[in-house]
Image: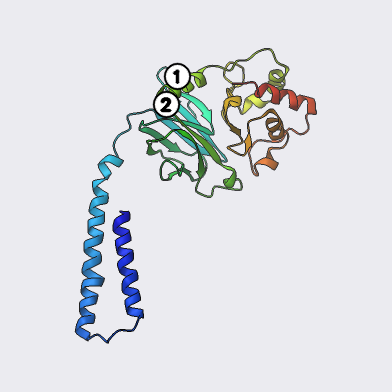
């Protein structure tokens, strides 16, 4: 495709330079031939050849996924991610059952063709990982399917490529491509309950109503409005890629999410004593 486009570009530029330079006048007959051959026949043949070549690639590009199925729900302004596993806990909330839920960090196995099920409960978003594949919209009321087959490992950045509100520019996510064994180990680890121990931060988390919006498996917190926080400390960032996942940044977001992510649905808890905010943040920062 690049070779064909380059040849056409060179031909058109050469023709333009020829037309702009000194040359003898051409006859009407020669002009008509140029229009018929250069303006009609040539682009028809070339575009038909490129189209035929592109269509020949479709069976490979549209081959069914042989790797894991991962549901991604784009929400204002973060990403709900569910890994479908055998015997996994049912997720519900519009995602396929039998999933292990996470948020804002997508893991993919290397050299495996994974199927991404894209949806949205609010407005149109667009899922895009430029280093791996083209973008696809996440549309309310339907599920779009996207196959991703990364061929090199590493950490890549994904973004929302469709304006979706005030924090559209603060809606990114991390994509980690690892070996199949590392991917499976990660999903198994994510499926476990949180390593909850006696901590004042847990009591404050529940007492202040955080469990009404967030889930922390292994506790009484079973909310489904916001991101699953069961293993929040294992993620590279919080607030959909806005801040590194540190205790200080978790406390900052709890205190005033609006200043980090405009129009975020989470209310601020700046009215709490600073030591309570710090305690909740320290507890969340221990959930690996």
Quadrant containing the C terminus is top right
Spot the residue most to the top. 198
Q: Which of 49 and 87 is in front in this view?
A: 49
Q: Quadrant of residue 7?
A: bottom left
Q: How far apart are marks 1 and 2 (CA)?
A: 21 Å
Q: What element carries label 2?
A: loop
1 or 2: tag closer to the N-terminus:
1
Q: Which residue is the site of mark 2?
A: 179
Horizontal and vertical percent position of residue 178: 45, 28
Which mark lies nearer to you, 1 or 2?
Answer: 2
Residue at position x 24%, y 71% from top? 38
Residue at position x 68%, y 31% from top? 250
Q: What element carries label 1?
A: loop
Q: Is 113 left or right of 252, judged from the image as shown? A: left
Q: Which of 149 and 144 is in front in this view?
A: 149
Compared with 201, 176 (above or below) is below
Category of crowding for the residue at label 1, using alpha-carbon neighbours closer than 10 angstroms: few (below 14), some (14–19), many (at least 20):
some
Compared with 220, 6 (above or below) is below
Q: Which residue is the site of mark 1?
A: 88
Q: Is 67 left or right of 191, judged from the image as shown? A: left
Disc number at residue 41? none
């Amino acid at each position: 495709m690049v070779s064909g486009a380059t040849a056409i570009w060179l031909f058109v530029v050469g023709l333009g330079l020829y037309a702009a330079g000194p040359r003898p006048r051409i006859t009407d007959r020669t002009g008509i031939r140029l229009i018929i051959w250069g303006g009609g026949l040539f682009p028809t043949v070339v575009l038909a050849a490129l189209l035929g070549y592109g269509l020949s690639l479709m069976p490979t590009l549209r081959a069914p996924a042989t790797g894991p199925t991962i549901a991604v729900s784009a929400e204002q302004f973060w990403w709900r991610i569910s890994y479908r596993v055998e015997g996994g806990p049912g997720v519900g909330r519009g995602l396929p059952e039998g999933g292990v839920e996470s948020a804002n960090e997508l893991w993919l196995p290397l050299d495996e063709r994974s199927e991404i099920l894209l949806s949205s409960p609010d407005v149109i978003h667009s899922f895009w990982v430029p280093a791996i594949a083209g973008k696809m919209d996440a549309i309310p009321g339907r599920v779009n399917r996207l196959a991703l087959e990364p061929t090199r490992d590493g950490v890549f950045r994904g973004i929302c490529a469709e304006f979706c509100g005030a924090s559209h520019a603060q809606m990114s996510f991390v994509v980690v491509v690892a070996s199949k064994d590392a991917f499976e180990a990660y999903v198994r680890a994510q499926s476990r309950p949180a390593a909850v121990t006696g901590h004042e931060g847990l009591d404050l988390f529940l007492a202040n109503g955080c469990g009404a919006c967030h889930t922390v498996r292994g506790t009484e917190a079973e909310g489904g409005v916001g991101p699953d926080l069961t293993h929040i400390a294992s993620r590279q960032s919080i607030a959909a890629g806005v801040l590194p996942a540190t205790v200080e940044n978790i406390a900052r977001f709890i205190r005033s999410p609006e200043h980090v992510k405009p129009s975020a649905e989470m209310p601020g808890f700046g009215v709490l004593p600073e030591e309570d905010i710090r305690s909740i943040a320290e507890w969340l920062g221990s959930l690996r």
